[in-house]
Amino acid sequence: MNIILLGPPGAGKGTQARQIEKNRGLVQLSTGDMLRAAVAAGTEVGLKAKLVMEAGGLVSDDIVIGIISDRIDEPDCANGFILDGFPRTLAQAAALEELLKAKGKALNAVIEIRVDDDKLVERITGRFTCGACGEGYHDTFRPPKVENVCDNCGASDFKRRADDNEETLRSRLLAYYKETSPLIGYYFAKDNLVSLDGMVAMSDVTVKIETILNDRA
């Protein structure tokens, strides 16, 4: 089973991808991780990527598709994969389709996790973690039981990501809607798209995704 997860930053794609991995034995593929692995392994396409990256350039779609091609041929992808963060553009979507077709593979589902932008900003800008154990918290939805004391380990060293601020998040949302949202129409026309509400509890999103995948298996 081969799946794409679509949705703006902070929609919960990574969390759901890890849950699908656990439930179905699929492999979550991150283009960033694959690029680094290919460069480290010294593969032909990895060496091409290394030259571009060392020159300060952007890795081309052809190189990224080549890295995905090599990766999905590996034994651990025999049961299928989850793409989170790729494709980002219509050109990448078309290239991915051609790649899968050439390998006799196809997408089973493209799942769009829809969110309310204002609520998403509130969700992201309010989150923080314990610097000692990594336990996650939120100013509104999950503050520590005792102020400035981690429920899990008792530490008082809390951290926030530098990019978890409203200005940065709205900039990332704009980039998503400009470049990636056309994929919604593309995959709808291909009859691959299934959309769901990403503003409900994460566990409810997981259940909905499982239902979708059962229907498309």
Image (cartoon, helix red, strand yellow):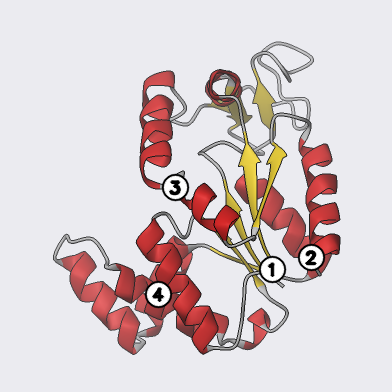
Q: Quadrant of the N terminus?
A: bottom right
Q: CA distance from mark 3 to mark 1?
A: 19 Å
- Labels 4 and 2: the sequence-earlier one: 4
**What amino acid is found at the position of numbered circle 3 in the picture?**
Pro
Mark in the foreground, 4 or 3: 3
**What amino acid is found at the position of numbered circle 2 in the picture?**
Arg
Residue 110 seen from this side = yes
Secondary element at tag 2: helix
Query: What is the crowding at mark 1: few (fewer than 14 residues within 10 Å), some, or many (at least 20)?
Result: some
User: Which residue position is annotated with label 4?
Assistant: 65
Position of 53 compared to 82: left or right?
A: left
Secondary element at tag 3: helix
Instruction: Compare residues 67 and 176 and report the one nearer the observer.
Output: 176
User: Which residue position is annotated with label 3?
Assistant: 182
Mark in the foreground, 4 or 1: 1
**What amino acid is found at the position of numbered circle 1 in the picture?**
Asn
Residues tagged 1 and 2 counted as in contact (Cβ below 8 A): yes
Mark in the foreground, 4 or 2: 2
Q: Is residue 58 above or below residue 166?
A: below
Residue found at x 37% / y 21%:
167
User: Which residue position is annotated with label 1?
Assistant: 108
**What amino acid is found at the position of numbered circle 4 in the picture?**
Ile
Residue found at x 66% / y 15%:
148
- Labels 4 and 3: the sequence-earlier one: 4
